[in-house]
Image (cartoon, helix red, strand yellow):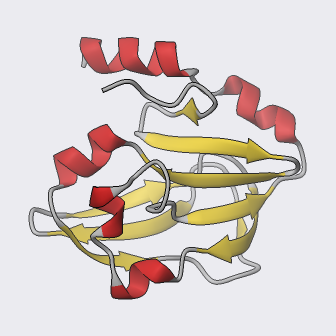
Amino acid sequence: MTYPTQFRYTKEHEWVSLEGNKVRIGITNHAQGELGDIVFVELPALEAQLEEGDTLATLESVKAVSDVYAPISGKVVEVNEGLEDSPETVNEDPHSKGWLVVIEVASPAQVDSLLDAAAYEKYLSSE
């Protein structure tokens, strides 16, 4: 699979899409494939302050329970409420409808430290 070039990625398999001073965050196609069928998604509360590395969400699949970590610090301003009733959306469309949260960031430049699509794909091939 080729990964969207407009996104940035982490080695923990999250994607980040910069939208002004906000970032939309989800997990990559690779991550959802490793997890298997996702049956439950626990998202943070609106207005929650997250630091880089904090637990952002918890995904429960038929295989395991996995934490998703905040790739960037900021305040949660939106959560994907549709995942409450349809957690499988993360499997079906991880880079679009399966997004998890939107965070307002103090410094959008934080995104620059993340991997671009080519670097992420190279990282996957070395895993």
Can you tell which quarter of the image residue 76 is in?
Answer: bottom right
Q: Which residue is at the far left?
A: 63
Q: Residue 52, how many percent across, how many down?
A: 65, 49
Q: Eyeballing the image, is 87 above or below 98?
A: below
Q: Residue 114, how many percent across, how many down?
A: 62, 28
Is residue 81 toward the left or the right of residue 72 in the image? left
Of 60 and 84, which appears nearest the observer? 84
Q: Residue 94, how many percent across, how many down?
A: 39, 52
Q: Which residue is at the far bottom?
A: 85
Can you tell which quarter of the image residue 77 is in?
Answer: bottom right
Q: Eyeballing the image, is 2 above or below 31?
A: above
Is residue 91 toward the left or the right of residue 6 in the image? left
Of 115 and 69, which appears nearest the observer? 115
Q: On the rendered image, what quadrant is the C terminus found in? A: top left
Q: Residue 90, how many percent across, how many down?
A: 35, 62
Is residue 50 toward the left or the right of residue 31 in the image? right
Q: Residue at x 69, y 56 (%)?
A: 51
Q: Residue at x 74, y 43 (%)?
A: 18
Q: Residue at x 26, y 14 (%)?
A: 125
Of 110 and 98, which appears nearest the observer? 98
Total labels: the figure holds: 0
Q: Eyeballing the image, is 59 above or below 9?
A: below
Q: On the rendered image, what quadrant is the N terminus found in? A: top left
